[in-house]
Amino acid sequence: MHKILKAASLSPSYTNTQPWEVAVVSGKKKEGLSDLIYDLASNKAEGHPDLPSPQGWAPEHVARSGEHGARRLAALGVQRDDESGREKMALMNYRFYGAPCAIFLFMEGSLNEWSIFDMGLFTQNLILAAHSLGLESCLQASVPKYSLEIKQFLGIPEHKKLIICISLGYADADAKLNTYRAIKQDPEEFTKWFR
Ligand SMILES: Cc1cc2nc3c(=O)[nH]c(=O)nc-3n(C[C@H](O)[C@H](O)[C@H](O)COP(=O)(O)O)c2cc1C
């Protein structure tokens, strides 16, 4: 973990402000937190995420997101109209997909989009460093839905913004969900060349 965080600490940030604040949760503490948020999610408790849900998706974003959902369901053998199967899949988030470690990234509540940009750079470097050491990750925007409860559980001041949760561990090559591979655009589809 130290090596991974050291690599992430080298991330660029707006005028080197380094807004990231990290909580690494494992062992009994992770179990307790997982039980708490799993119960909330199972009971469909209302969440209060610090970041609003994405807005203004164009048709191509809706299409990619829909395809992603459908392919993940297919990987697990869950039918689209199988409500309980879909819920079971969604709830896997709150067990951190069985990972032994959950990393929570916070930043000061007064910061704006540029700091979220920095948080993204930090996140990417963190997961790439982990990958280089044989560890895989899952970024989770679903978990910060219960930001308030997570902050209370960890004793983090409520004015901090919880940006993302990262589940981290060794990949289970036999897990059905790990057979899913996201479809990526060819660079030619999103690039215009000016010469
Ligand atoms: C900001 C962000 C939030 C995400 N939230 C979740 C999540 O809550 N649960 C989950 O299973 N995957 C989540 N993901 C993973 C994406 O679904 C995944 O990155 C995407 O489908 C592309 O797949 P790839 O990472 O394998 O390339 C998230 C990814 C990002 C960047």
Image (cartoon, rainbow, N blue to C red):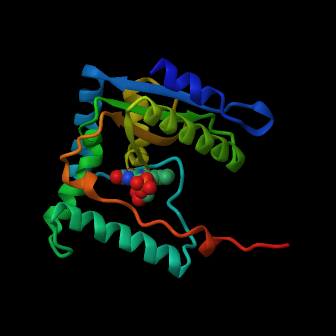
Residue 77 rendering spot, x and y as whole percentages: 15, 65
Q: Report whether 13 appears left or right of 144.
A: right
Outermost residue toward the front? 195
In the displayed structure, would residue 77 be above or below residue 141? below
Residue 173 rendering spot, x and y as whole percentages: 23, 44
Question: Residue at left 37%, top 25%?
Answer: 25
Which of the image's four quarters has the N terminus? top left
Question: Residue at left 42%, top 39%?
Answer: 166
Outermost residue toward the top? 2
Splitting the image into 4 quarters, where does residue 116 fall? Answer: top right
Question: Quick one: 29 or 9, which is closer to the camera?
Answer: 9
Question: Quick one: 131 or 28, which is closer to the camera?
Answer: 131
In the displayed structure, would residue 110 be above or below residue 24? below
Number of disc labels? 0
- The reply to whether residue 160 is visible in this rendering is no
Residue 149 rendering spot, x and y as whole percentages: 38, 37
Residue 158 rendering spot, x and y as whole percentages: 51, 33
- The reply to whether residue 56 is visible in this rendering is yes
Outermost residue toward the bottom? 59
Q: Report whether 30 appears left or right of 105.
A: left
Q: Report whether 100 appears left or right of 135.
A: left
Question: Quick one: 156 or 190, which is closer to the camera?
Answer: 190
Question: Residue at left 68%, top 39%?
Answer: 110
Which of the image's four quarters has the C terminus? bottom right
Question: Quick one: 152 or 60, which is closer to the camera?
Answer: 60
Question: Quadrant location of ligand 1?
Answer: bottom left
